[in-house]
Image: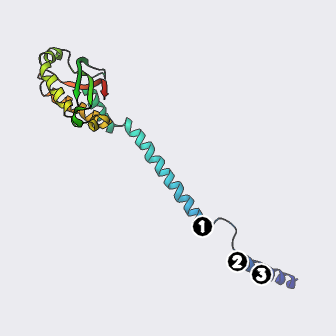
């Protein structure tokens, strides 16, 4: 019996030796590490993305919202609108072969500003005509160019006003030919 026990122990030791010599079947450690890193990166990306969305509702963007409301009025409504006549100007360059036709509306922060605008209408028209005729075809084609023109008109017209200010410029027609 002692012989049988010894044989069994020897056989077990041989099997353990064979098991150690054979490579383990399973996932390599490198693959497991790569999967863990990929999950961490995906989780971090999801966190950053969610934080970006949530920041719109946090205090960081409240200042921007309040600033926008201040320019649009306290309730976010559009202020009084004053419509100017249509402007038709030759564009600069190309020997006057191209022209621009623009219908402009002015948004005001105060209703009483209508009277001051009517008094200063010749100044407004002259300034706008001078500005528009200085633009080239490339200036008025792009979206950025139109935004630039809008900003320049807004700044220029507000320099003339004393009782209020123009908060926005709207283009009704914007035809380039």
Identify which residue, 108 or 17, lies in the foreground: 108
Q: Which residue is mark 2?
A: 20
Q: Earlier in the sequence, mark 1 or mark 2?
A: 2
Tell me: 109 left or right of 30.
left
Q: Earlier in the sequence, mark 1 or mark 3?
A: 3
Determine whether label 3 and label 2 are within 8 Å by CB: no
Query: x, y percentage for residue 31?
Result: 59, 64
Vertical order, 119 against 143 (above or below): above
> What element does badge 3 sit on?
helix
Q: Which mark is residue 14?
A: 3
The image quadrant of residue 28 is: bottom right
Real-space Cα separation, disc 1 to disc 3, in angstroms: 27 Å
> What element does badge 2 sit on?
helix
Identify which residue, 11 or 41, lies in the foreground: 41
Q: Which mark is residue 29?
A: 1
Give neighbour class at mark 1: few <14, some 14-19, many 20+ (Cα, 10 Å).
few
Query: x, y percentage for residue 102?
Result: 27, 24
Q: Nearer the viewer, mark 1 or mark 2?
A: 1
Tell me: 25 left or right of 7.
left
The image quadrant of residue 165 is: top left
């Amino acid at each position: 019996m002692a012989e049988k026990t010894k044989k069994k122990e020897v056989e077990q030791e041989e099997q353990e030796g064979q098991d150690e010599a054979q490579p383990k079947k399973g996932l390599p450690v490198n693959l497991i590490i790569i999967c863990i890193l990929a999950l961490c990166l995906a989780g971090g990306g999801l966190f950053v993305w969610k934080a970006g969305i949530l920041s719109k509702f946090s205090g960081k963007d409240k200042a921007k919202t309040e600033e926008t409301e201040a320019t649009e009025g306290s309730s976010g409504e559009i202020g009084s609108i004053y419509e100017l006549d249509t402007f038709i100007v030759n564009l600069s360059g190309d020997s006057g072969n191209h022209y621009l036709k623009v219908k402009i509306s002015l948004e005001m922060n105060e209703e009483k500003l209508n009277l001051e605008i009517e008094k200063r209408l010749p100044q407004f028209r002259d300034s706008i005509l001078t500005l528009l005729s200085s633009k080239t075809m490339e200036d008025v084609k792009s979206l950025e160019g139109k935004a630039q023109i809008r900003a320049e008109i807004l700044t220029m017209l507000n320099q003339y006003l004393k009782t209020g200010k123009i908060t926005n410029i709207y283009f009704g027609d914007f035809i380039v030919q």
